Amino acid sequence: MAEQTLFEVAEAVRSGLRTAESVVGEALARMEVTASFGAFVHVDRERALADARAVDARVAAGELLPLAGVPVAVKDNLCTEGLETSCASKMLGGFIATYEATAVSRLRAAGAVVIGKTNMDEFAMGSSGETSVFGRALNPWDTERVPGGSSSGSAVAVSSRAVLASLGSDTGGSIRQPASFCGVVGFKPTYGRISRRGLVAFASSLDQIGPFTTDVADAALLFSVMAGQDGGDMTTSDAPVPTVDELLQAPAPLRVGVPKEYLAEGLDPEVRGRLDAALDALKAEGAEIVEVSLPHSKYAVATYYILASAEASSNLARFDGVRYGHRDTNATSLIDTYRRTRTFGFGAEVRRRIMLGTFVLSAGYYDAYYQRAQKVRSVFVREFEAAFRQCDVLLTPTAPTAAFKFGEHGDDPLTMYLADIYTIPANLAGLPAMSVPAGLTAGGLPVGVQVLAAPFAEKTLFGAALAIERRLGKMAAPPAASGEKS
Amino acid sequence: MSVTLETLKHTAELARLDLSLLPTEEQHRLAEQMSRILAFVDQLSEVDVEGEEPMTHPIALPTALAADVAVATPGAAAMLANAPARSGDEIVVPRVIDGGGEGG
Amino acid sequence: MKTQYEAVIGLEVHAQLGTRTKIFSRAAVTFDEPANSVVNEVCAGYPGSLPVLQRDAVTLALRAGVALGCNIRRKSQFARKNYFYPDLPKGYQISQFDAPLCEGGELVFEVAGETKRCGITRIHMEEDTGQSSHASDAPFSLIDLNRAGTGLIEIVSEPELRTAEEASAYFKELRAILVAIGINDGVLANGSMRCDANVSVRPVGREAFGTKVEVKNLNSFKFLREAIGFEIERQIAEIEAGGTIYQETRLWDDAKKQTIMMRRKEGSADYRYFPEPDLPHLVVSEAWLAEVAATLPELPSQTRARLQEVCGLSAYDAGVLVATDGFAAFFDGVAALGTAPKAVTNWLSGSILAAINARALSYRGGIGFVTAAGHRILPAAIAELQKLVEDNTISSTASRTVFEKMLTTDAAPAAIVESEGLRQVSDTGAIDGIIDEVLAANPSEVERYRAGQVQLFGFLVGLAMKASKGKGDPKLVNARLRAKLDGGA
């Protein structure tokens, strides 16, 4: 049985063929069946069904909703009214926001129904999903392996087909890397395209919300609904947002750049094989392949860890046990309340990044670390500008390897950080970037390739992604999930 | 660079973390990991950044200032629903010792 | 020879921006609301909330920059000042650090008739904190975030003030400017403007500064003068006694009339400032700046000059009008209706000032003078009252009685004159009758006057005025009495 797309689900609801309530009911049932993958952390079934009935009423009233009745799963760092937002941290256990993230509001306005919050690395800090206070989510392709992170649950929810769409956030690859590991499409738009209002900040100048879907066109649909300037986020752009039809138009023949530095040592041969397959696909679609150079690429991870940790150390200062969330009551003085609340409320990875970020901003180190990294960021932006004068899109691996095993990176944070080497540059330069499934390894693990475009050139990016998908075929559901399909 | 336990302690205090609450081996592991991460990021000293502007936002952003028009607030009850301790419409914290804030 | 010392003083003044909403959120700025009621997710620092800068707050800050002759940065930047405090919801304050909106201005003020100048280092924008309170013996504090996020400008002076009097005069003139350009109503007791002073001393002739001490929360001109005066003496005495001045923060204890140590600074605090990534650069267009400059209200120094040059007031009168809240605008209002400038200043420095001192009248920014009963005293009413004097309808004594009545009723002056029967008697026949009665009742005084004791004339005028119950036109009484006594009529 061919899988449905979001267009088909919404059309079925709009045309009265199905009710939103039945679609959401089915998604809730799928969520039950796939519960062992650990994708979801907060669910309110009654509310989801009530929301679905409200969508049915709007459809009956004649509203033309682009996402009529579409169930979506939302990462646990996006504020949802009435549904817990905990960032998979003890620190925010039980927190209910008084307002809703703009991206979520826009999905709801378009007829989507939030069916639950998804698992993640604590405060989005991690590349494997293992730092969640709720325990890890499992990769549906091989439950011995990580789903990737930090948007682990959102990738798993779509990969396991509990839903066909979910939201994640991407600071250094947190959408694209788990999308690659789980065999789904994961898209990080240009910085400033989608409002960050209501996204619990990790690193404000790098964070961007984006969708996980089973195919490229569905990602275009979600993007077109969520994108656009928001009065609630001054870092949103006023650039016009392409319509979904514009995004899905076949582009003129593309010049595809391959950065030679990305093919250096450390790249798994099987991943290289899938990248070559994607390049062949693009060639077959009429693209011209050119080699480009991004000579500073090797500094991306270092730059990222300074900037992201610095911003995080400040963004996470608000978690002090005063107004919301966890407060340690074993202290009597104010200062000890702060110390105990924060030391025990955060997990080890979050503490480590707060420490690193605090250090690089502190007196005597600011210029050598933080400000120097900000200057290197300027170099990256210029380097990408030069590359995009030679080509329309860049094609790179999404991650150096397919999904790795739990615990494989041991206790070494640096090895884990290097798993983000191909995804980080897009965040530093604010570029749109998508991980598109490009087939399986010999061992049956999915591998994604990454398409990058110049800022606001999403239309070009979708053109290339669609071409790859057309030639290589849409990635099927993992055997474990499809076996359970109704 | 290598991070001493002294630097670690000072940094933790700035961040209102108390590492002495953690097991000793975890403190040492953190010091060792931070040293290695800092040694790794030290590679940026190789990059020629002469004349480069420190960049906060990679794309040009509009100056879209809001109008000075008030929007109703949710009210104290809603805003304090998440507070760990409160008294009436105020949030309760262990006593503030100083006369005023550090900032100005 | 005994060492002579001089003080080096710099002031940091925080002024709240009198906008309708907070600087980074659209929660209303109000006073006296129930705790935590004008708070939204941005004010409370909720996860995921983002600051959104509003235009009017920037316009006010630009006005201050233009009024103080600063260079306006066309592309300024906000920065985060990181520190933990329960009244600081986000764990950082959004402020400006190395790219403030305004730099390099100047303030001119007068001390004891002498004109002085003090450089303005910078004016930057930032957000206010919430407030914490506690009962004296309670082990806990209570947090109210209503004030959190209210817009502020911080005006930092150069360390160019040398005495407590200069510091006080600087702050007074700065306050007058900020009120004139509409930053806020200037009520220091409400925290609308808050002043911290950096004070150090050094031997006269030495260039290097001494160790500076910060004296915080000097929220009245009197405290400011007394605290700085005390601090200068304390530091000199400490040095003379061979002691050390520590870099510390002190508070003024008004009961003990001394500064007390609050905290000692070990090195400088590490606020880990960095550019605020949630806000783009603040870009000020030439058109915006030109509009601010073109619409800048008259500044106190300009008002003083105009009152002297155009209205012919003395420097003293002009100074008093500008230094007293609402007086200059009220003066202009009354004078515009044709009342002579001197008459208006007499009203302001006489009855109106007396009523303010007696708390029967108060000035409210944006509204005007309001009586204790809640009625407004408008410039038109004073113009009308003065006209009643000038056209001889009432005597000037009676006009003061009418004003007193205006403080307790909202009737018009003319109506009060009628209801109180204060209309002046200007009928010659009636006056003659009164005078005749007075002369008949005092034959010996008349006799002595005519014998040359002319000083008795005043006594007889007094009797005649009394007999008229104060309503006789004094000029007419004078003329008729003189005619009857001297002319034998």
Image: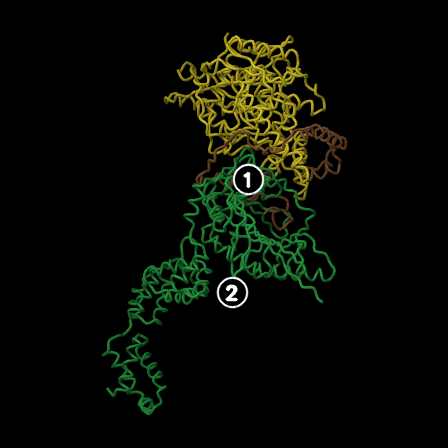
Chain colours: A yellow, B brown, C green
Disc number lying in front (2 or 1): 2
Q: Secondary structure at mark 1?
A: loop
Ranked by sequence position, the earlier of labels 2 and 1 is 1
Q: The numbered mark 1 sits on a residue in which chain?
A: C
Please say if B52 is above or below C411: above
Callout 1, which amino acid? Phe
Q: Residue A209: horizontal and vertical position, in percent? A: 53, 26
* Closer to us: B104 or C472: B104
Mark 1 neighbour density, 10 Å: few (under 14) some (14–19) many (20 or more): many
In depth, the one of A28 and A157 nearer the eye is: A157
Considering depth in this image, is C417 or A323 the residue closer to the camera? C417
Q: CA distance from mark 2 to mark 1?
A: 40 Å
Position of A485 with respect to C309 (left or right) is right
- Evaluate whether residue A82 shows in this view: no
Q: Amino acid at mark 2?
A: Gly
Q: Position of residue C91 (x, y in %)?
A: 60, 40
Image marks 2 and 1: residues in contact by CB distance under 8 Å = no
Numbered tag placed on residue C78 in the rendering: 1
SS category of the residue bearing label 2 = loop
Residue A59 at x, y = what percent?
Answer: 39, 21
Q: Position of residue A434 (x, y in %)?
A: 55, 19
The circle on residue C113 is 2
